[in-house]
C-alpha cells in the first residue's frame, strides 16, 4: 500500500491523545484542541465520515481535582473521569459548533463490544450518527469500567472502533512524530513505513513516562497489530504538526504508516479475534498448528496437548503452539472440563468457521 491510496479513504477513525489535548498542568486546553477540531471538521464537511476516539477525560479531571500524577486507585480514577468527561464534551460541542457540526457522546466498555448483540448495536448507532452528519466522540466509560470489563487504553479502543465499523483508515495523533528508532539518541530516526510488525518493531516501541497517559508506543503497536490484521491501515503521527490530518489524507509523507494485511477479516472473525478477553488456552501440537494455519482446518481433540484455565462452551480461547506462542483464537464448542475428560473424542473442539489465525 502507498500513501497515495490514503486519498481514497472515506471512513476514518481519528484518535486524539491526552498529551495533545491538555496543557502542562494536565488541564484541557481548548486552544490546542481547536486546530485539531478544525481539521476534522474540514474533512467531515468535504464528505469524509470521521469518528473521533478521544482521551483527556481523566487528565482533565486530574487537573480539576488537583492530582499531580495519574491516580492508581480505581475510585480516584473514576472520579477524575466523571469530572473530566463533561468538560471534555462541552469543549468539543462548542468547537465543532463553530463549523456547523453536531457531536454525539459514545461511551463504551469492553463488555459492550464483546457481547454480540451490544456489539452490533454499537456499530449500528455509530453508522446512523455518521449518516446524519454527526461526529461521534468515543471514549471508554471509565466512570463504571473496572479491570474485567476495561478495554484498557484508548489506542486499543480506537483500533476496536475501527474494526467495529469497519473504517478505511485509523489515524492516531499523539505527541510523537511516529515510530522512532533510537528514540532519545543522536541517531534517532523516524520509520516512515512498517509492512510487518515483528520482534524488531516491538523492540523499537517504548513505554511512556507521561503522568496522564497509558502505554506510550507499546499500546500503539498493539493497536497496529489489531487493525492491520483486519485489513485496515494505520498512521501514527504528531498532533502538534499544523494540518497533519490534511497532510495524511492528501497522501503526504508524515508519521509512520502501518500497512494492512492482505488477508482481510470479515465482521464475525474480527469480533472473535479482537473483542474478547480469552477465558483460557488450548496448547496444540505442531501438526494441529500446521492444519489450522496452512490448511484452514478445524481443531480436533487429538491435536490438543494441554488445556489451561477454566472456560465454558461458546467462550473465546487462545490457541497456542508448544512454545506458548498464541497463533489463533476461537469460539470453543466444549468446556475445559469436557475437553480434559476426553469425552469429546472425534468431535470438533473449534470449528474452522469459529477460528481466526492471528
Image: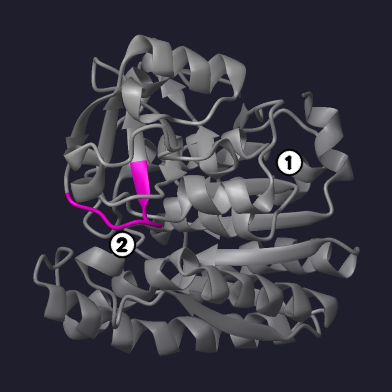
Q: Which residue in the structure is indicated by mark 1?
A: 248
**Above or below, comparing residue 334 to residue 185 in the picture:** below
Residue 189 numbered mark, or none:
none
Which of pointers 2 and 1 lies earlier in the amino acid sequence? 2
Q: Secondary structure at mark 2?
A: loop
Q: Residue at 72%, 28% (x, y): give it.
A: 253
Task: Give the distance between the C-alpha atoms of the residues marked 2 and 1, in whole angstroms.
Answer: 27 Å
Q: Is residue 316 magenta?
A: yes
Q: Nearer the viewer, residue 158 or 207?
A: 158
Q: Is residue 184 left or right of residue 249?
A: left
For label 1, count other residues whose C-alpha is less than 10 Å away and answer few (under 14), some (14-19) or many (20+).
Answer: many
Left/right placement of residue 44 relative to residue 142 reads: right
Residue 353 percent across, percent down from the top left: 60, 41
Indicate the quadrant where residue 25 lies. Answer: bottom left
Expressed as whole percent of the image width and height from the top left, the position of residue 98 reads 74, 84
Predominant SS along the magenta part: loop
The mark total stands at: 2
> What are the residue bounds of the magenta stretch?
310-317
The x and y percentages for residue 113 are: 48, 66
Q: Nearer the viewer, residue 15 or 263?
A: 263
Question: Where residue 265 appears, x then y in whole percent?
Answer: 66, 40
Q: Residue at x 79, y 44 (%)?
A: 249
Q: Residue at x 44, y 30 (%)?
A: 299
For label 1, the SS is helix
The residue mark sitting in front, 2 or 1, is: 1
Q: Which mark is residue 24?
A: 2
Amino acid at each position: 500500500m502507498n500513501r497515495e491510496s490514503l486519498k481514497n479513504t472515506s471512513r476514518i477513525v481519528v484518535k486524539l491523545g491526552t498529551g495533545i489535548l491538555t496543557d502542562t498542568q494536565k488541564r484541557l486546553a481548548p486552544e490546542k484542541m481547536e486546530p485539531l477540531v478544525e481539521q476534522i471538521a474540514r474533512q467531515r464537511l468535504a464528505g469524509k465520515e470521521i469518528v473521533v476516539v478521544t482521551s483527556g477525560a481523566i487528565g482533565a479531571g486530574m487537573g480539576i481535582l488537583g492530582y499531580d500524577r495519574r491516580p492508581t486507585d480505581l475510585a480516584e480514577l473514576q472520579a477524575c473521569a466523571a469530572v473530566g468527561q463533561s468538560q471534555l464534551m462541552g469543549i468539543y460541542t462548542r468547537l465543532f459548533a463553530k463549523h456547523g457540526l453536531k457531536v454525539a457522546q459514545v461511551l463504551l466498555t469492553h463488555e459492550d463490544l464483546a457481547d454480540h448483540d451490544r456489539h452490533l448495536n454499537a456499530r449500528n448507532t455509530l453508522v446512523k450518527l455518521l449518516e446524519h452528519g454527526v461526529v461521534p466522540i468515543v471514549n471508554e466509560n471509565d466512570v463504571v469500567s473496572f479491570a474485567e470489563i476495561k478495554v484498557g487504553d484508548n489506542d486499543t479502543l480506537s483500533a476496536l472502533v475501527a474494526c467495529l465499523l469497519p473504517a478505511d483508515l485509523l489515524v492516531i495523533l499523539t505527541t510523537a512524530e511516529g515510530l522512532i528508532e533510537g528514540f532519545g539518541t543522536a541517531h534517532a530516526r523516524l520509520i516512515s513505513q512498517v509492512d510487518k510488525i515483528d520482534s524488531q518493531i516491538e523492540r523499537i516501541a517504548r513505554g511512556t513516562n507521561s503522568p496522564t497517559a497509558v502505554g506510550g508506543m507499546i499500546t500503539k503497536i498493539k493497536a497496529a497489530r489489531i487493525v492491520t490484521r483486519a485489513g485496515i491501515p494505520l498512521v501514527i503521527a504528531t498532533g502538534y504538526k499544523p494540518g497533519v490530518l490534511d497532510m495524511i489524507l492528501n497522501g503526504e509523507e508524515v508519521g509512520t504508516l502501518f500497512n494492512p494485511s492482505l488477508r482481510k477479516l470479515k465482521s464475525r472473525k474480527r469480533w472473535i479475534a479482537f473483542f474478547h478477553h480469552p477465558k483460557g488456552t488450548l496448547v496444540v501440537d505442531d501438526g494441529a498448528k500446521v492444519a489450522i494455519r496452512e490448511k484452514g482446518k478445524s481443531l480436533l481433540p487429538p491435536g490438543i496437548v494441554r488445556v489451561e484455565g477454566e472456560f465454558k462452551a461458546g467462550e473465546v480461547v487462545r490457541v497456542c503452539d508448544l512454545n506458548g506462542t498464541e497463533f489463533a483464537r476461537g469460539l470453543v464448542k466444549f468446556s475445559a472440563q469436557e475437553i480434559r475428560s476426553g469425552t469429546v473424542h472425534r468431535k470438533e473442539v473449534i470449528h474452522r468457521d469459529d477460528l481466526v489465525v492471528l
